[in-house]
Image (tube, rainbow, N blue to C red):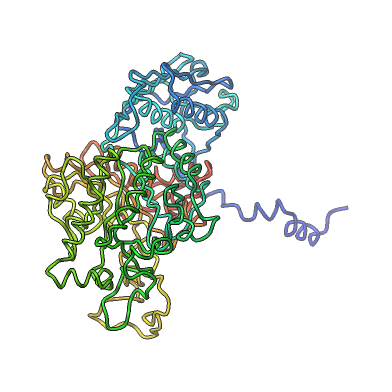
């Protein structure tokens, strides 16, 4: 008996396979284009030679051996051995037209010529990597353990899972490849503010692991600010007892040592920052006598603001106890953090906050100045930091370039001072290096990752506007407006990638730029959004600071970087880093179709 046509229709409509096939593209639709053979490593290495599109599998018994050994390198070898053996990276667009040749790679031999070089400013991170054809071993050579660690990351990114029968289910790596690599800048970092909002240790460790994957090498830990003092220091424990948000939101000495050791194992320096004399409201719980204008409303009506944002308080340079407490803080900090650099802040000193104190008002009435107050503070703390603690002092640019409060160069010796820029883009960088100082670039116009998320102060009537904003007035709510974010717009990865931190500098001035840091200030961030705020935008900075943003023809390579960053973000997510997407998935599946122009 023939089946009823109605039965066949119902079967077609309700059978799940029929439903799926009905949603499939028509046979006449062309499949997505396949990508040519390319080496997908982020950041892009300086030099790659790979003559033929041939791969070799990695043996199930793959191992890494280093000669000579080194404590950090041993940790890195354990990490990368596990990663390379277990990761089965499937590219968004799998390469085609390749061959699998040779014997499986059983050994990655790492050779370090000088294993005793400590991790620090300017350390050599260069390496060479080779996978000889028809050999069961690959090689990494470097001058230091820190270069070897960068080479291990590159080798891990060379591996991917093809699914080819000849690979035997194992990852494959390019055969007969030679890579020679070294960074353009020795200082490549991320600043994380843990004072506005707290980040658990596990999230900091995950961030450091992601930094290593992107070959970043400095974790600038902005530990304290006016809002909280979350680090427990043995000489002054009450700063955390009264200045942290809660006992659960503090970093103990064990936490700090764990973070520092973990970072060092990946070749990452940890530079601590205790911001002072400004941004010190959190000190007032333990030592109210040394803090001016503490616990006051930040923007009093018809008077100058007492702080750049809510939470007031600055250290009083005229109180001798200020320096006893500050020296205890710096001494304890140096004991916990071995890095030669220590960041002492000194940004956004507020004159009205100091003037709130009657002793300061008397000092000013007698002919003193705000500049002199800052000079007194620096003269009492900087020599202790440099000579007693043997640290290079790092300050924000404000100490030299502040529009309201600053000091002269005689207060800041060039050989023991590094200045970090954040205002006016290339202009302030040039002013600093032209004055003879070494610079770390963190321009808010390019490198501030918190920008563009709107304002966060409450009771703001500016949002209560229903009509279109008038022509000729600064836009706030309408498209193109700031939305209350002082540094709007949002800094896209392309904005970050295209930034040239040496713009407008002479060759001599450029040599004084150590590198750059992207910054995540945490007024509107905490652990729940950390990965997406940082990645993959910090990856964009990582590549430009490692190998630049230009191709061999001298042109910016942002079009090429778009394809590669999509793939790298895809891999970071698979590695447990919750990086946000930069495009719809359709775009990397259809290369170049989402460009503004072809």
Q: Position of residue 176 (x, y in %)?
A: 40, 20
Nearer the observer, 304 or 596:
304
Nearer the observer, 263 or 3:
263
Asked if one can make out residue 49 in the rendered structure from this viewpoint, the answer is no
Is the residue 532 above or below the residue 383 in the image?
below
Q: Position of residue 106 (x, y in %)?
A: 52, 17
Q: What residue do we see at 28% from left, 63% from top?
A: 316
Residue sitting at the far top: 135
Q: What residue do we see at 31% from left, 71% from top?
A: 480
Nearer the observer, 230 or 46:
230
The image shows a total of numbered marks equal to 0
Q: Position of residue 441 (x, y in %)?
A: 25, 49
Asked if one can make out residue 468 in the rendered structure from this viewpoint, the answer is yes
Q: Position of residue 161 (x, y in %)?
A: 54, 32
Is the residue 480 above or below the residue 385 in the image?
below
Relative to residue 9, is residue 115 drawn left or right? left
Relative to residue 370, is residue 223 drawn left or right? right
Nearer the observer, 319 or 49:
319
Residue sitting at the far right: 1
Q: What residue do we see at 70% from left, 53% from top?
A: 18
Residue sitting at the far bottom: 467
Query: Residue 423 occupies which quadrant of the picture?
Result: bottom left
Residue sitting at the far front: 320
Query: Residue 561 occupies which quadrant of the picture?
Result: top left
């Amino acid at each position: 008996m023939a089946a009823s046509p109605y039965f066949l229709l119902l079967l077609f409509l309700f059978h799940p396979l029929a439903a799926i096939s009905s949603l499939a593209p028509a046979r006449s639709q062309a499949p997505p284009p396949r990508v040519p053979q390319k080496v997908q490593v982020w950041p892009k290495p300086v030099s790659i030679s790979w003559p033929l599109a041939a791969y070799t599998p990695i043996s199930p018994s793959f191992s890494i051996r280093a000669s000579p050994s080194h404590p950090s390198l041993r940790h890195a070898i354990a990490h990368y051995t596990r990663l390379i053996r277990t990761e089965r990276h499937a590219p968004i667009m799998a390469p085609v037209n390749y061959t699998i040749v040779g014997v499986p790679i059983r050994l990655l031999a790492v050779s370090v010529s000088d294993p005793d070089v400590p991790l620090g400013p300017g350390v050599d991170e260069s390496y060479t990597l080779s996978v000889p054809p028809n050999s069961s071993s690959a090689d990494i050579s470097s001058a230091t353990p820190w270069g070897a660690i960068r080479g291990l990351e590159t080798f891990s990114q060379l591996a991917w899972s093809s699914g080819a029968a000849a690979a035997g289910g194992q990852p494959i790596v390019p055969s007969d490849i030679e890579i020679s690599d070294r960074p353009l800048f020795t200082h490549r970092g991320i600043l994380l503010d843990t004072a506005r909002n707290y980040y658990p240790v596990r999230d900091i460790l995950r961030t450091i692991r992601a930094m290593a994957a992107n070959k970043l090498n400095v974790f600038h830990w902005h530990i304290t600010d006016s809002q909280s003092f979350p680090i427990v220091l043995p000489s002054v424990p009450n700063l955390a007892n009264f200045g942290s948000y809660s006992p659960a939101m503090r970093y103990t000495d064990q936490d700090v040592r764990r973070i520092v050791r973990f970072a060092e194992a990946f070749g990452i320096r940890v530079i601590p920052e205790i911001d002072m004399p400004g941004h010190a409201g959190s000190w007032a719980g333990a030592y109210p006598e040394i803090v001016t204008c503490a616990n006051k409303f930040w923007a009093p009506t018809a008077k100058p603001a007492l702080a750049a944002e809510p939470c007031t308080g600055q250290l009083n340079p005229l109180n001798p106890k200020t320096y006893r407490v500050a020296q205890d803080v710096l001494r304890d900090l140096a004991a916990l953090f071995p890095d030669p650099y220590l960041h002492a802040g000194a940004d956004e000193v507020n004159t009205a906050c100091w003037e709130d104190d009657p002793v300061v008002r008397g000092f000013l009435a007698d002919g003193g100045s705000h500049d002199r107050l800052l000079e007194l503070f620096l003269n009492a703390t900087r020599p202790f930091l440099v000579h007693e603690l043997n640290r290079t002092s790092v300050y924000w640019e404000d100490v030299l370039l502040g529009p309201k409060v600053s000091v002269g160069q005689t207060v800041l010796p060039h050989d023991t001072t590094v200045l970090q820029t954040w205002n006016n883009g290339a202009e302030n960088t040039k002013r600093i290096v032209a004055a003879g100082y070494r610079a770390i670039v963190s321009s808010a116009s390019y490198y501030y990752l918190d920008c563009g998320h709107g304002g966060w102060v409450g009771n703001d009537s500016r949002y209560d506007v229903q009509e279109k904003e008038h022509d000729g007035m600064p836009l706030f709510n309408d498209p193109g407006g700031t939305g209350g974010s002082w540094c709007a717009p949002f800094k896209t990865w392309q904005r970050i990638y295209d930034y040239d931190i040496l713009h407008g500098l002479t060759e001599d001035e450029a040599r004084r730029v150590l590198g750059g840091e992207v910054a995540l200030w945490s007024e509107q961030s905490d652990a729940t959004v950390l990965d997406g705020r940082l990645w993959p935008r910090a990856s964009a900075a990582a590549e430009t600071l490692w190998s630049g943003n230009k191709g061999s023809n001298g042109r910016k390579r942002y079009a090429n970087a778009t394809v590669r960053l999509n793939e790298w973000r895809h891999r970071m997510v698979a590695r447990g880093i919750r990086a946000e997407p930069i495009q719809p998935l359709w775009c990397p599946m259809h290369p170049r179709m989402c460009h503004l122009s072809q």
